[in-house]
Image: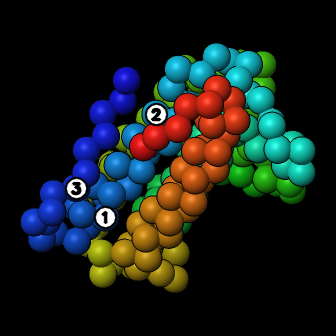
Amino acid sequence: MHHRRWPAEDATGELRLSQEFLQFLRHTAVGKVDGLSPELAAAAPIATSPRTTALGVIKHLTAVERHWISIVGAGAALPSLWEGSPDPSWNLTAADSPRTVIAAYQAEWERSTCALAGLSPDGLSADGERTIRWILAHVTQETARHVGHLDLLRELADGEVGE
């Protein structure tokens, strides 16, 4: 089980609050996949979106974090996980399971935390085109959007609804 905790309601540090909301959403995403069998986690139940699977969403969120926070935000020399057309971050391999995909996502959280260390919300990203505030807001909205997809995918997989 993954522990979700709402950010402190009396929060005063903007960057910390942004990171805490992102962390809440990350745990929500993982919780939507946790407990699914490998088959259900890899199922694509939406006929018009054959690459949209619970595992694919988590892999895509891993790619989003790497690209925006570590590569664009902090300038890390890491390989992108989504270069190509169509976006390959949604693709599953035989090695993908709920355990391995969640572990890779959680490892990316740690990388993101390290990338953000010492940066301020007003600071510019490594490419000089946007603020760290903008990057965190973008990753948070992207994560929230895909948590909505995971809500639907989980309900279609086994009927589970909830937080």
**Residue depth check, mark 1 versus mark 3: number of the one nearer the observer:** 3
Marks 1 and 3, the one that precedes in the sequence: 3
Q: Amino acid at mark 3?
A: Pro
- Report, in whole angstroms, how far the alpha carbon at label 2 lies from the one at label 1: 20 Å
| Viewer-proximal residue among 139 and 131 | 139
Q: Residue 107, relative to residue 136: is it above or below? A: above
- State the residue at coordinates (53%, 38%): 161
Q: Percent position (x, y) of residue 159?
A: 62, 31
**Left or right: 79, with 119 as reference point:** right
Image label count = 3
Q: Residue 159, relative to residue 84: is it above or below? A: above
CB contact under 8 Å: marks 1 and 3: no
The 10 Å Cα crowd at callout 2, few under 14, some 14 to 19, many 20 or more, is many
Q: Quadrant of the C terminus?
A: top left
The 10 Å Cα crowd at callout 1, few under 14, some 14 to 19, many 20 or more, is some
Q: Which residue is mark 2?
A: 31
Q: Quadrant of the N terminus?
A: top left
Q: Amino acid at mark 2?
A: Gly
Residue 124: quarter of image: bottom left
Q: Residue 57, relative to residue 134: is it above or below? A: above
- Report, in whole angstroms, how far the alpha carbon at label 3 lies from the one at label 2: 17 Å
**Left or right: 136, with 15 as reference point:** right
Q: Percent position (x, y) of residue 122?
A: 30, 81
Q: Which structural element holds mark 1?
A: helix
Q: Percent position (x, y) of residue 133?
A: 37, 75
Which mark identifies residue 7?
3
Marks 3 and 2, the one that precedes in the sequence: 3
Marks 2 and 1, the one that precedes in the sequence: 1
Q: Which residue is mark 1?
A: 18
Q: Which structural element holds mark 3?
A: loop
Please say whether residue 51 is visible from this viewpoint.
Answer: no
- State the residue at coordinates (89%, 51%): 48
